[in-house]
Amino acid sequence: MIDKELQEQAKQMAKYLVAFMGVELKRVMYPVEVKGDALAGQIMGVTAETMKQRRNRGFYRDKYHYYKKSDKIVMWYRDALLEEWSYQNGSEALLSS
C-alpha cells in the first residue's frame, strides 16, 4: 500500500502536469499576438467585456499585456496572458518552464 505522503506528492504532480499541458495547448492553439478582447478572454477564461473592463481599469499593462493597433483594435500578447492565467490559477511553477 502506498503511504499517504507519496499519494499526496502524486496528486500534486498530476495537478501540475494537467496545468502545464493546458498552458502548452494554449500556446499551440493561439498565435503570438491575439486580436481583440473576445479571443483574449477565451485564453483567460472570462468574457470579452471582462477583458475590456480589466484593461480600462489598469489590471493589464499597456505594452506588456496588450497594445493598441488603432483606436478600435487591441492586440494581446499570448505569452503575457498565459503568464497571468498561470498566476491566477496558482500555477506559478509553470512560469519557469
Image (spheres, rainbow, N blue to C red):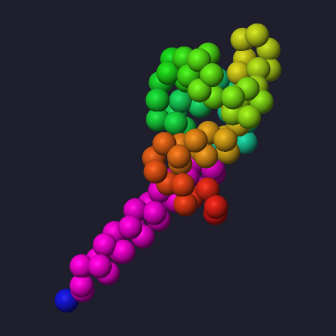
Question: Does any portion of residue 47 appear in the rendered image?
Answer: yes
Question: Does any portion of residue 37 appear in the rendered image?
Answer: no
Is 58 left, or right, of 88 in this rendering?
Answer: right
Is 47 left, or right, of 60 in this rendering?
Answer: left
Is 73 left, or right, of 48 in this rendering?
Answer: right
Observer-nearest of 15 and 24: 15
Observer-nearest of 14 and 88: 88
Q: Residue furthest left?
A: 1
Percent across and percent down for residue 63 are 77, 30
Q: Residue furthest top?
A: 71
Which residue does the image show at 62% across and 39% down from the upper left?
Answer: 81
Observer-nearest of 48 and 13: 13
Quarter holding residue 32: top right
Quarter holding residue 95: bottom right
Q: Where is 58 relative to 85, above or below?
A: above
Q: Where is 80 relative to 5, above or below?
A: above
Residue 1 colored in magenta in the image? no
Q: Where is 35 relative to 80, above or below?
A: above
Residue 19 colored in magenta in the image? yes
Segment tinted magenta in the rendering: 2-28
Observer-nearest of 33 and 84: 84
- The quarter in which the N terminus is drawn is bottom left
Prevailing secondary structure class for the magenta stretch in the rendered image: helix
Percent across and percent down for residue 57 are 59, 17
Percent across and percent down for residue 31 are 70, 41
Percent across and percent down for residue 59 are 59, 26
Q: Where is 13 relative to 76, above or below?
A: below
Which residue does the image show at 38% across and 67% down from the upper left?
Answer: 12
Which residue does the image show at 50% across and 21% down from the upper left?
Answer: 50
Which residue does the image show at 67% across and 41% down from the upper left?
Answer: 80
- The quarter in which the C terminus is drawn is bottom right
